[in-house]
Structures are given as C-alpha cells and as structure tokens.
Amino acid sequence: MNPSTSLLDTPPAPHYFGPEHEAFRRTMRDWVAREIAPNVNAWDEAETFPRTLYRQAAEIGLLGLGYPEELGGTEVDIFYMIIASEELARAGSGGLQASLLSHSIGLPPVLAHGSEALKQRVIPPVLAGEKIAALAVTEPSGGSDVAALKTLAVRDGDHYIVDGEKVFITSGMRADFITCAVRTDPASKGPNGISALLIDGDTPGLTRTPLKKMGWWASDTAHLRFERCRVPVANLIGEEHRGFKTFMTNFNAERLGMAALALGYAQACFDEALDWARQRVTFGSALSERQVIRHKLVDMLRQIDAARCLVYELAWRTEHGRDDPARLVARIALAKVQATQAMQFCADAAVQILGGMGFMRGTKSERIYREVKVMMIGGGSEEIMKDLAARQLGI
C-alpha cells in the first residue's frame, strides 16, 4: 500500500474541508514524509530531536496556525489544526509531536489574557521557531486535580516569589517560556486564588530534572522545582486569583486536539497492519486472505471511522458555536475517550497482526502501543473525562 494514502482517506467534505485545507494537508504530508518519518526511530532512541525542526515547522506555517498575523501567525479555522494533528501522527511518534507543539498549550493563555507587552515579547519568537513554550500545571500531589495545586506565588513588591514543583511537563527541559499555574492567595482553597504566571526558563531558582517514560521518548519531559524564584508581576497572565477558568478553557482545546491525534495514530497502526497483512505469507497465503485478519482490520476501520465522525462534528460545532457550552465540554471530553480507545484498540490489533515484528522497536505500531496510555491520561484521564461529562450533562 502506498504510505502516502490510506483506505480512510476520503474526498473532502465541503462543510469541513475546502481546497485551501487540502492544499495545507498536502504541504504537511510532504513535509512529514520528507523531514520527520525517516528520522523518528533515531530521534526516539536518542530521546530528543533537533531544535532546528521548530524553525522548519515555522517556515511551513505549522507553528503559527490560529494566531494573529501581527504576532507572526496565520488566522485559520479549527480544521487546519485537525489536519496538522492527523498528518503529524502519520509518522507515529507522539514524543516528537508533543514537544514540537507544546506551544499549543503553553501560548493560548498568553494570547487570550496576557498584556500586550507580554504577548509581543513571548509569542512572535515562539511562532518563528526561535523559542519554545510549555505549560506547567500538574503537580506531584494533585495530578489532574488542578484545584488542589500547591505551588505558591507570594507578592513581594513588583515581583512574585514562587516556590513549589511541577511534574510531567512536556518541553520542560528546554522551554524558554513556561506558563505556570500558581496559587497567589495562600489562604485560599480549591479553584479560588489560582493565577496564571509566565516564568522565563532562565529564572534563578528554577531547576529541571528529566524524566524517563514508557513512551514519548523523543519528548523531553521534566520535573520542575521553583525555589524562591523572583518573577515580575508584569508576567501575570490575566487577573490575579482568577486563573482557574483560564486553565480549564485551555484544556478543552487540548482535549479536542488530542482526540484528533489519537485518530491519526490509530490510522497509522491500521496502515502498517494492512501493509504487513498483504505482504506476509504464512502457510501459502497472505495474512490478508484469512478471515480472522480481515475482521481485525475491518474492526479497526470501524473504530476509527466512528471516532473521526464525532471529532469532526465537534470541531465544526466548536468553530460555529452550535452547542451549549456545558454540553460541548462534555462531548469533547467523551470524544477524547472515544478516540483514545480507538487508538488503544488499533495499536493492540496491529501489534497482534504484525506478530513478532510488532514486538520489535522500529515499527510504528510498537511505539504507538507504548504511547497509548499517555494519550488516555494526559489532558485529563479517561475516568476524569467521564466524570466531567456526567457533571456537565447533569447525569
């Protein structure tokens, strides 16, 4: 099977994708095939990738998607982001995608709520691929419970004194700008008294420790410690003590993006499994001629297609404001569950079809199999997504 095509590639749906979308898809697909796919195995084993890739991503317009032109971006609809997620996933390296696009969760709070001076200082160099942005919310004691965060930022004149720690931070080792969730009111509890603060990567008192992971090897993931870090009050993002909603809104977009990525990884597993099944001959016949294998492949298609329909529809509703906000939050949470379960199913089925080769490092399916769990946990675990949906829907 031609690796640039798939049985799941369909003619553009005019209410989702127009000619300009498809032109961008071709650009992305060519770039991924040329610059990323041949290198992902080596980068995964090296647990890093060249920083120059950020500049390349900026040159093709990837990093600037959705940002104002005056800040170096390109204002586009949400389906450009869906395309970018799907095409990056074709290379089958979640670690590369996570770090290359860490700005997609690190910059939105700055864009939405930062001062004009902060936006001008931070956003253009990141979109140009010159600087790296990250988001730091999760803590060792709280996990997905953002309201329980303990990192303190105490006002001291025109600075905050920041003490605390963050864990599982994507791009945490080399980020130049860190959008950090802090508690600016030490007496507060729960979601009250939380603020968003931009912390520069070279701030004295910030130390970073790399973390070893089951998957996403090419992504640097760090444990951050803040010890008496002095951060200018000018780096406050939005209103003091009112940052909880900022982070919750950010998660909604992140979850829809993760759902689209999960679909791409599921499709990558399907494509590799189909290609193997057509070539692999056992007992005189290709695997693809055996009913049990054909059923596995069709079940993979069914899972992917069902999840894709849901993700595309929710993207359209998000773009056009066609849903009640609470209902949309719930449905996006469930779409992330649906898509990551499809990814899990397809990764497992692909490894089974590949047999011994599926257990070998260097196949997409083996790598994606290891990376399924971070997709099911990151951005809010499956269990939290279901509970969130139930609360939003009044169940």
Image (tube, helix red, strand yellow):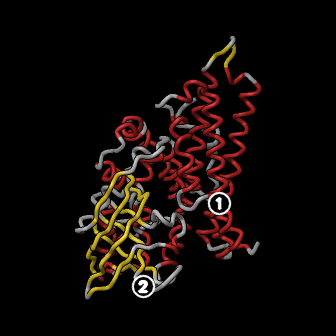
Q: Determine whether, in the image, residue 273 is placed left or right of residue 133.
A: right
Which residue has dot 2 on it? 185
* Residue visible at 32% across and 62% down in the picture: 126
Query: What amino acid is found at the position of numbered circle 2 in the picture?
Result: Asp
From mark 1 to mark 2, how far is it between C-alphas? Answer: 30 Å
Above/below status of 21 relative to 343: below
Say which of 213 and 275 sits in front.
213
Say which of 289 and 75 sits in front.
289
Q: Earlier in the sequence, mark 1 or mark 2?
A: 2
* Residue visible at 53% across and 57% down in the picture: 378
Q: Determine whether, in the image, residue 44 is placed left or right of residue 19.
A: left
* Image location of residue 246, percent across then percent down: 48, 76
> Which of the two discs, 1 and 2, sits closer to the camera?
2
Q: Quadrant of residue 259?
A: bottom right
Q: Residue extending furthest bottom?
A: 157
* Image location of residue 210, percent across then percent down: 35, 51
Above/below status of 61 relative to 135: above
Say which of 298 and 345 sits in front.
345
Q: Secondary structure at mark 1?
A: helix
* Image location of residue 377, percent across then percent down: 56, 55
Above/below status of 68 relative to 2: below
